[in-house]
Image (cartoon, rainbow, N blue to C red):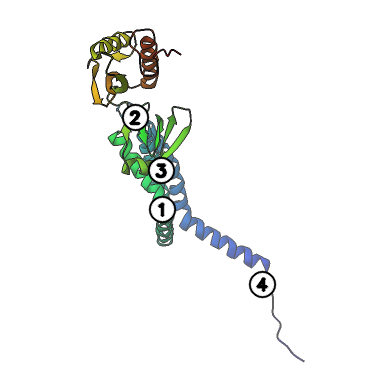
Amino acid sequence: MGGIIFLAPYPMDYLDKFYDRAISWAVTFGPKLLVAIIVLFVGVWLIRVFNRWIRRFFSKKEIDPSLKSFFQNLLAIALQVTLIITIMGILGIQMTMFAALIAAFGVAAGLALSGTMQNFASGVLIILLKPYRVGDNIVAQGQQGTVSSIQLFYTVVTTFDNKTVIIPNSKLSNEVIINLSREGKRRMDIELKFPYSVDFNKVKEQILNSISSIENVSNDPPPRIGINSLEPDSYKLILNVWTTAHGYEDTRLALQEKLMNDFKNSELKLPGMEEKTI
């Protein structure tokens, strides 16, 4: 009984086909790969040279350190992405799929990070417009303290009782900020109450003597003392003095202590200081 006999290809046939395809690939793709490698090394070297030049350029300009670092990183990333896209184009890799993936990723990231990007944009505005600087005393979002750091996404405030408060920049760019130290000076208001039996002119003289011994109290503008309100049994006196913004609380405590002790040791008594006899 006759039959058909199938002969398996000789192993050398596979090797010949492999070599033929390898040579064809090397001839077709090899020059592109070689050019891509050369472009990669040259591009990396050029990016490093450009980054050094950018750092020297920014160091000569009066630009906020946070914004300077941001621009340097942004330019470096943009150049690296451009280099990768160029190499992919040299190798003949189709960009349609990558473009679609990047677009989809960008939309998803934009939706997920909308709040973060808002903080980022607000951080850039704060760095450019400078409503406050590092070292300023501010009141914002119910917090009062010293600005210790301004980042692109948030601002760090150290309160006067040494708590660290991190505030998103979007809250600071859209809400009221009170800068307590920007003008360099602050006015201090102290109210005192005296009975009508106490002569106002003597009180005024006593207060001016007390103020003269307190450091950080400015004479420009000069202290102002006046009657703030009249009550049935007494009058209220208001004292306005100017002091440096930094150290305001220390000056306020020192002045109040000085006033209390001076009135206590004089014939002029604050309410409640009068000696009572039984």
Q: Earlier in the sequence, mark 2 or mark 3?
A: 3
Q: Residues within 10 Å of mark 4 (few under 14, many from 20)?
A: few
Which one is nearer the viewer's eye here, 12 or 52?
52
Q: Earlier in the sequence, mark 2 or mark 4?
A: 4
Residue for badge 2: 133
Amino acid type at circle 4 is Pro
Q: Residue furthest right?
A: 1
Task: Point out residue 275 in the picture as x, y percentages from the top left corner.
Answer: 41, 12
Q: Earlier in the sequence, mark 1 or mark 4?
A: 4
Residue for badge 4: 9
Q: Could you give the CA–CA distance between mark 1 and mark 3, rounded to whole angstroms?
A: 20 Å
Q: Earlier in the sequence, mark 1 or mark 2?
A: 1
Closer to the camera: disc 1 or disc 4?
1
Q: Residues within 10 Å of mark 1 (few under 14, many from 20)?
A: some
Residue for badge 3: 77
Q: Could you give the CA–CA distance between mark 2 and mark 4, rounded to whole angstroms?
A: 80 Å
Task: Point out residue 157 in the picture as x, y percentages from the top left corner.
Answer: 42, 32
Amino acid type at circle 1 is Ile
